Image (cartoon, rainbow, N blue to C red):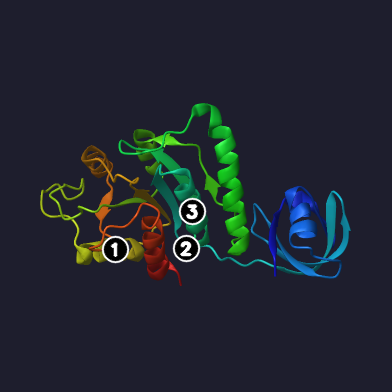
Amino acid sequence: MNQFFIDPSAVEGNRITVTGDNVNHIANVLRLRKGESVQLVEQLSGLTYYADIVSIEPDSVVCEIQDVQSESRELPVAVTIYQGMPKSDKFEFVIQKAVELGAVRIVPVNMKRSVVKIDPSKVDKKCARWNAIAESAASQSKRGVIPEVSVPMSFEDAIADAGKCEAILLPYELASAPVSEKDGGSSEPLSDMDRTRSILNELRSHEVKSLGVFIGPEGGFDITEVDRACEAGAHIITLGNRILRTETAPIAILSWITYLFEK
């Protein structure tokens, strides 16, 4: 059943009036017809309406509610992905897959080794496209909320923003190098796979409700960025012995978080 997000004001009694871009998608892209069923989700509450189409007009689709459910497909931990800015097509892929895997927010970050720098005059247009991709992915994966794609940030601003999260993770291809964590205070080798498991299991046992995850760009993290993240209390982890592409790393860590945290 196809899912669409609606504003709460669209609901009146046992009817829902769908407007905006969803009208074209329902009528012309999917070619749904009167009597067919759709799943409509309120953007703020995540309340899910199962409804049948009763009329299709050029600027609206009216549906009759058949059932209402309050169901959640969200992860028990709110994950924000701080993605080192990659090339445009790769970032759009990251948005799509991060949303499908449960991230609540994706933040593009300008890092020292980022290949792409967004023209400030094009930020609004880019953000509109990115958020449209997020909405489409959220509908496809039957999410109850539409994750936000933020405007690009500097690395320092991203670190400050991530301070709102209960914990910060930074997967690093040289995780076993002698880089110190703030809470460890030593220069012992950081993260082999066992240590990474231990960190994630500890976060799960403490039932953390929010995680910030930093992902490096195509060129990886600069060592000064890793040090700065450590100063901010980040846990440096590994995603294994293989070097992952920047667009693959979010999939790996979100899959791991899903496996450990989802009940």
Q: CA distance from mark 2 to mark 3?
A: 24 Å
Choose top left, top right, bottom left or bottom right for residue 244.
bottom left
Q: Amino acid at mark 3?
A: Phe
Nearer-the-camera pick, 105 or 218: 218
Q: x%, y% of residue 77?
A: 44, 59
Q: Amino acid at mark 2?
A: Pro
- Identify the mark at residue 15; answer none if there is no mark: none
Residue at the spot of label 3: 93
Q: Secondary structure at mark 2?
A: loop
Q: Residues within 10 Å of mark 2 (few under 14, many from 20)?
A: some
Using residue 78 as the reference point, say whether residue 234 is left or right of it: left
Image marks 2 and 1: residues in contact by CB distance under 8 Å: no
Q: Residue 214 appears at what percent x and percent y?
A: 35, 48
* Residue in the image at 24% along x and 65% along y: 198
* Location of mark 2 (residue): 76
In this view, 123 is above or below 72: above
Q: Upstream in the sequence, badge 1 or badge 3?
A: 3
Distance of label 2 from label 1 (alpha carbons)? 15 Å
Q: Quadrant of the N terminus?
A: bottom right
Q: Residues within 10 Å of mark 1 (few under 14, many from 20)?
A: few
Q: How far separated are the C-alphas under marks 1 and 3?
A: 30 Å
Kindly identify which residue carries mark 1.
Answer: 202
Question: Which of the 4 image quarters holds residue 228?
Answer: top left
SS category of the residue bearing label 1: helix
The mark nearer the N terminus, 2 or 3, is 2
